[in-house]
Structures are given as C-alpha cells and as structure tokens.
Image (spheres, rainbow, N blue to C red):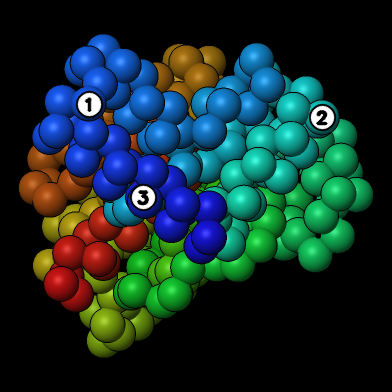
C-alpha cells in the first residue's frame, strides 16, 4: 500500500544517513521508532508493520476503549492495511463501528468485527467445542481464523459427556487437509486431551470461563489443560479464541513455506 511504501523509503533514507554519519545515532533512533508505528492522538500507537515483521497483524482489543477511539484507530489503521479485526466488542461498540464502516462483517455471538478484506487463504483449521456454552469463544476463534486466511471447519457440542459424538468429526478432520485443531472447552477441560490422543495434528486448547463454583471462571479448566497427559497440546489463555486462531495461522503458514 502507498503509506507502507513511503515508510519503507523513509527507512532506507535513515539507514543511508546512518552509514554516512550525517546524523547522530540518537537522532536516527528517534526517526526509526517514529517510522515503525503510527501515533493516533494521545491514546494509541498503531504497529502497522507487525504483519510484515511477525506474520500476524495487529488486532484491536475493544474492552477499555470507547467507541470513538475504536473508530479512530480503525480509520488510521486502514491507511496501512486492507483489513482490520476487532475483538471482544460490546453491542454499543459494534453499532459505532458499523455506522462508520457499513460493510463490516460482524459476528455478534463473539463480539468480533472484520473491517475490510480478509487475508488470502493459507490453510485450514478445525474448531471443536465441548458444549454449546463454549460457542461464543469458538466463534471468536473462527472469525479470527477466517480473517487470517484460514478455511474453518466447525464441530460444536462434541464433549466428553457424550464422547460418541466425537467419532464422526474426527473422521472428517483426518480425511481432510486440516493443518491444526482448535479445541474449546470449559468445566474440567478434558476434550483437548482426548482429541490429541487420537490425531496426528497440533491441538490448540482454549479454556473457557464456563462452569460452576470451583471452575473459578476458567482457572480450573486452564490448569487441567496445562497438565494434559496427551502430548502435542498447546494451551492459550482463558476465553482467548483470537490467540488460538493466530497460532493456527502460523502453523498453516509454516506448513506451506
């Protein structure tokens, strides 16, 4: 995009100055830092080259931001990117986004919004949930994965309380060209261990805050997943569907290098 090309050209000029010792290092360091991000008023610094640097774009985490701030960040970030993802947005925040960007792709179940274009397809991920109460987190993972260029196959409500429900989904997954599996579960969090013991694919476990009393808002689930006896399980934070999707996209990207 033009804005990024201009920034890259600016960086080239800075490096030439460093080589020729036109400016002192502190002066050049300040210029380099300013070249690598875009300041948005007094509340945000948009890391517009994160995707080029780290293989994953910066997303906008909505909690703690008012609707106007989110819209301002979106307007600025869309100067550098063809598409931006917003996560954990409230109903009020979503209304404000859609008012400014009518073509936004909204997933109300998860509070995720895609503004602009999704990335080109790079792979495929399967997403499983233990119960229907885990679907909102799974939908965050699904929307984020689609935004990041993954085709998503969904299998919901296939938890260990009725483990026979898992047979057909695993048959489908193993017969398809799936790169990784995201497993979303609350309560005792057993499903990722079961899945990982039956497939030869990376399993990304997402604990949810679903459960009674001693579930401790997902802490018990998280601890259970972290001590899985099945190898090949990576665990993200509680209710972090976005983090799971990013990890899955990196797996797909590496597989196709």
Q: Which residue is mark 1?
A: 22
Disc 1 to disc 3, C-alpha distance: 19 Å
Q: Quadrant of residue 254?
A: bottom left
Vertical position of residue 255 compared to residue 127: above or below = below
Disc 2 to disc 3, C-alpha distance: 30 Å
Q: Residues within 10 Å of mark 1 (few under 14, many from 20)?
A: few
The circle on residue 8 is 3
The mark nearer the N terminus, 1 or 3, is: 3
Residue located 90% across and 49% down the image = 99
Q: Residues within 10 Å of mark 2 (few under 14, many from 20)?
A: few
Residue located 52% across and 42% down the image = 59
Residue 220 visible in the snapshot: no
Q: Indicate the secondary structure of the residue bearing disc 1.
A: loop
Q: Nearer the viewer, mark 2 or mark 3?
A: 3
The mark nearer the N terminus, 2 or 3, is: 3
Residue 58 point in image, percent of width and height: 47, 42
Tag 1–tag 2 contact (CB < 8 Å): no
Q: Decide if residue 153 is on the left or right side of residue 113.
A: left
Q: Nearer the viewer, mark 1 or mark 2?
A: 1
Q: Decide if residue 115 is on the left or right side of residue 191.
A: right
Vertical position of residue 102 compared to residue 93: above or below = below
Of 163 and 108, the residue lying toward us? 108
Residue 32 point in image, percent of width and height: 33, 29
Q: Decide if residue 219 is on the left or right side of residue 93.
A: left
Q: Which residue is mark 2?
A: 68
Residue located 46% across and 43% down the image = 48
């Amino acid at each position: 995009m033009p804005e990024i090309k201009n920034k890259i050209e600016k960086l080239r000029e800075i490096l030439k100055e460093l080589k020729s010792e036109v400016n002192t290092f502190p002066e050049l360091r300040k210029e380099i830092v300013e070249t690598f991000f875009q300041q948005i008023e007094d509340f945000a610094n948009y890391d517009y080259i994160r995707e080029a640097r780290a293989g994953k774009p910066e997303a906008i985490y909505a909690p703690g931001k008012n609707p106007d701030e989110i819209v301002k960040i979106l307007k600025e970030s869309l100067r550098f990117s063809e598409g931006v993802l917003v996560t954990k947005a409230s109903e009020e925040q979503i209304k404000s986004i859609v008012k400014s960007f009518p073509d936004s792709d909204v997933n109300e179940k998860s509070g995720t919004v895609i503004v602009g274009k999704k990335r080109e397809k790079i792979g495929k991920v399967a997403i499983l949930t233990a119960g229907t109460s885990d679907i909102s987190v799974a939908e965050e993972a699904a929307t984020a994965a689609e935004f990041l260029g993954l085709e998503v196959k969904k299998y919901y409500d296939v938890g260990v309380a009725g483990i026979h429900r898992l047979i057909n989904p695993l048959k489908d997954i193993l017969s398809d060209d799936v790169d990784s599996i995201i497993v979303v579960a609350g309560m005792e969090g057993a499903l990722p261990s079961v899945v990982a013991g039956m497939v030869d694919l990376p399993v990304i476990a997402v604990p949810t805050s679903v459960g009674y009393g001693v579930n401790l808002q997902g802490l018990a689930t998280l601890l259970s997943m972290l001590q899985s006896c099945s190898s090949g399980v990576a665990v993200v934070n509680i209710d972090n569907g976005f983090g799971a999707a990013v990890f899955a996209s990196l797996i797909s990207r590496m597989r196709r290098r």
